[in-house]
Image (cartoon, grey):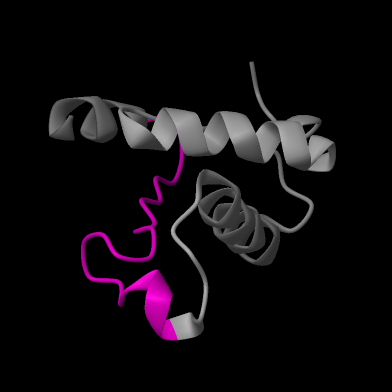
C-alpha cells in the first residue's frame, strides 16, 4: 500500500484520512453516531468537501474504504462529478 501511495505522490498531493474508530480517530460512538456504512460515507464526503472544495480529485480505496467510497459516490453525486478517471 505504501509503495502505491508513494507512486501516486509523483502526480499530486496524497491525503489519507482516517475514518472514525480507525487509526488515530476517536470512536464514532463518541459523536453519538452508529458505525454504519452510510455514516462513514457521510463523514468522508464532509472531509472531501471541506478539504478539496471545487478541485478535481482522484480516489484510491481498498478494503472497507472501497465500500465506504462507493456508498459516498452513490449518496453524493456532486463528488462523483469531481473525480478524475
Where residue 17 sits: x, y (%)? 39, 57
Where residue 48 sits: x, y (%)? 62, 55
The span shown in magenta is 9-30
Q: Note whether residue 62 is visible.
A: yes
Q: Nearer the viewer, residue 21 or 47?
A: 21
Q: State the residue at coordinates (30%, 72%).
A: 25
Q: Quadrant of residue 53?
A: bottom right
| Residue 69 forms part of the magenta stretch | no
**Residue 76 located left or right of residue 14:** right
Residue found at the far top of this picture:
85
Is residue 60 positioned above or below 26 on the image? above
Q: State the residue at coordinates (38%, 65%).
A: 20
Q: Nearer the viewer, residue 57 or 11?
A: 57
Where residue 67 sits: x, y (%)? 47, 30
Q: State the residue at coordinates (60%, 48%).
A: 38
Where residue 19 sits: x, y (%)? 38, 58
Q: Quadrant of the N terminus?
A: top left
Q: Note whether residue 60 is visible.
A: no
**Residue 23 located left or right of residue 47:** left
Is residue 61 positioned above or below 18 on the image? above
Q: Quadrant of the C terminus?
A: top right
Q: Quadrant of residue 8?
A: top left
Q: Nearer the viewer, residue 33 or 22?
A: 33
**Residue 64 located left or right of residue 55:** left
> In terms of secondary structure, what is the magenta stretch mainly?
loop
Q: State the residue at coordinates (70%, 38%).
A: 56
Amino acid at each position: 500500500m505504501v509503495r502505491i501511495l508513494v507512486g501516486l505522490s509523483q502526480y499530486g498531493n496524497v491525503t489519507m484520512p482516517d475514518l472514525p474508530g480507525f487509526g488515530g480517530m476517536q470512536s464514532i460512538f463518541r459523536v453519538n453516531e452508529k458505525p454504519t456504512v452510510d455514516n462513514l460515507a457521510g463523514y468522508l464526503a464532509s472531509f472531501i468537501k471541506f478539504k478539496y472544495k471545487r478541485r478535481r480529485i482522484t480516489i484510491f480505496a481498498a478494503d472497507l474504504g472501497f465500500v465506504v467510497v462507493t456508498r459516498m459516490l452513490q449518496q453524493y453525486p456532486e463528488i462523483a462529478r469531481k473525480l478524475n478517471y
